[in-house]
Image (cartoon, helix red, strand yellow):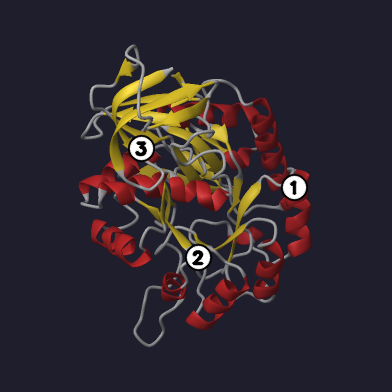
Amino acid sequence: MFYKNARIFTSDFRFVTGGFEVRDGRFGAVLPETVPEDAVDLQGATVIPGLVDVHSHGNSGADFSDGDYEGLKKMAAYYASCGVTSFAPASMTLPYDVLEKAFATAKQLKAEAPAGHARLMGIQMEGPYFSYKKRGAQNPDYLKEPDFEGFKALFEGCDGLVRIVDIAPELPGAAEFVEKASKLCTVSIAHTDSDYDHARAAVDAGVTHLTHLYNAMPGIHHRNPGVIPAAVENPNVQAEIICDGYHIHPASVRLAFTKFKNRIILVSYSGRTAVLSAGTKFELGGQDAWLRDGVARLADGTIACSAANLWQCLKNVLSWNVPEEEAVRAATYNPAKALGVLDQIGSIEEGKLADFLVCAPDYSEKRVFIGGVEL
C-alpha cells in the first residue's frame, strides 16, 4: 500500500513532504520519485516512527515486576493505544528469583507477539546494583553490590532480552562489571552518589547510557561536577529524561536537550499508576505507594514512578519549546539505538518494521499503525 501527501520524519531527522510504501508489514520505498495515483492521501498529516519507551514499569494496574504474563499483555495493549509501538519494561530492585520470573514473562511475550500490542524489544534491569543514599523509590532491602555472574545468569535465562542494565559506578567492582556487561548489552549509570572520577571511569569502561537524568543522582557543583558532566563530555553516552511535568522542570529539560545534543531519550517512567485514579494505593517493589497530585510517592513522600505515557511526554516537550525534530528523535530513534534494535525500528526506512503514527500538525490527534496495520 502506498501513502502520499505526508509530512514524513525521515531517517536523517528532517521533515519532508512526500509518500511512502508499506509492504508485508515493513516499509517499502520512502519518498519515491513517483507514487501511484490511488495511494492513500494523508492530506499533509505528520508521519513519525512509532514511539519506543525504554523505561516504563507498568500501567493499568499492572507492573512488570509482578511476573504476571496477563498483566504484561495488558501493559503492551495500553502502550500500543498510546502510540508506543515498542517497549522495554523496567524491573525494580528485587531478589533474583523475582526478577527471573518477570523476565520469563518478557520472553513469552516476545515469542508470542500478539497482534494489536506493542512489541517487546528488550528489558531494562533497573537494580539491584545501586547506592543506598540515592536509592529513591527502590527497595533498600534488596540492594546488592555489582555481581556479574548473577547478572549473566539472568541475562542468559531470558535469552539475552536484557538490553539495558543499570549500576551505580561508585560501588566496589563497578568498573569491572561495566567492562564485562557492556559486551552483552547497554550499561547505564543510575541511582548513584558518584563523583566525577568514578563516573568517568565507568564511561571509559563502557557505559553508554544515563538512567532518568537528574533524578537519583547528584546535581552539578562547580567543584564537584559529578555524573552529569562525565556523561555530557562523552558523545557515546545517551541520557533518559522523564517529561511528565512533575519529575523535572521544563527549563531543566531544555537544558538537557541543549547539552546532550541529539542524545536525549524520552521515557515515561510510568508505573502501574498510569490510568489509575488519584489517591490509589499500590505496591511498588515491595513497598506501599500512592498516586497523589499526578505522581506516585512512597509513604515518606519520596517521588517514585509517573502516571504518564510516552505520547503525553512527547507532547509536553513540544509545548516546552524543544525543537520538533529533536523531540521526535528522542522518542523514536535514540531509544531504539539504546536497545540495539535500530535495524528493525526507530526510523522510517525501507526494510524496517512499518510501525508509525499519523499525527495532526499540532500532535493533538494520532492514528497508530503496527506492522502497517492500523489499530
Does residue 319 appear to the left or right of 32 in the view shown?
A: left
Q: Residue at x 65, y 52 (%)?
A: 94
Judged from this view, the residue extending furthest toward the front is 33
Q: Residue at x 77, y 45 (%)?
A: 157
Up/down of 371 relative to 249, above or below: above
Up/down of 261 relative to 81, above or below: below
Q: Secondary structure at mark 3?
A: helix
Up/down of 259 relative to 63, above or below: below
Does residue 213 appear to the left or right of 165 in the view shown?
A: left
Q: Label 3, label 1: how many angstroms apart (C-alpha)?
A: 33 Å
Decide: few, some or many residues near mark 3? Use Cα within 10 Å; few <14, some 14-19, many ≥20.
many
| Rendered location of residue 339, percent (x, y) | 56, 49
Q: Label 2, label 1: how many angstroms apart (C-alpha)?
A: 33 Å
Which of these two is toward me, 269 or 364? 364
Circle 3 residue: 311
Checking the image for residue 236, the label placed there is: 2
Which of these two is toward me, 37 or 80? 37
Q: Residue at x 70, y 52 (%)?
A: 95
| Rendered location of residue 137, percent (x, y) | 49, 56
Question: For the C terminus, which image quadrant?
Answer: top left
| Rendered location of residue 118, percent (x, y) | 52, 30
Q: Secondary structure at mark 1?
A: helix
Circle 1 residue: 97
Decide: few, some or many residues near mark 1? Use Cα within 10 Å; few <14, some 14-19, many ≥20.
few
Mark sitting earlier along the chain (2/1): 1
Instruction: Tell me, yes or no, if residue 296 can be seen here.
Output: no
Quarter of the rendering containing residue 204: bottom right
Quarter of the rendering containing residue 165: bottom right
Q: Residue at x 65, y 37 (%)?
A: 106
Mark sitting earlier along the chain (3/1): 1
At label 3, the amino acid type is Trp
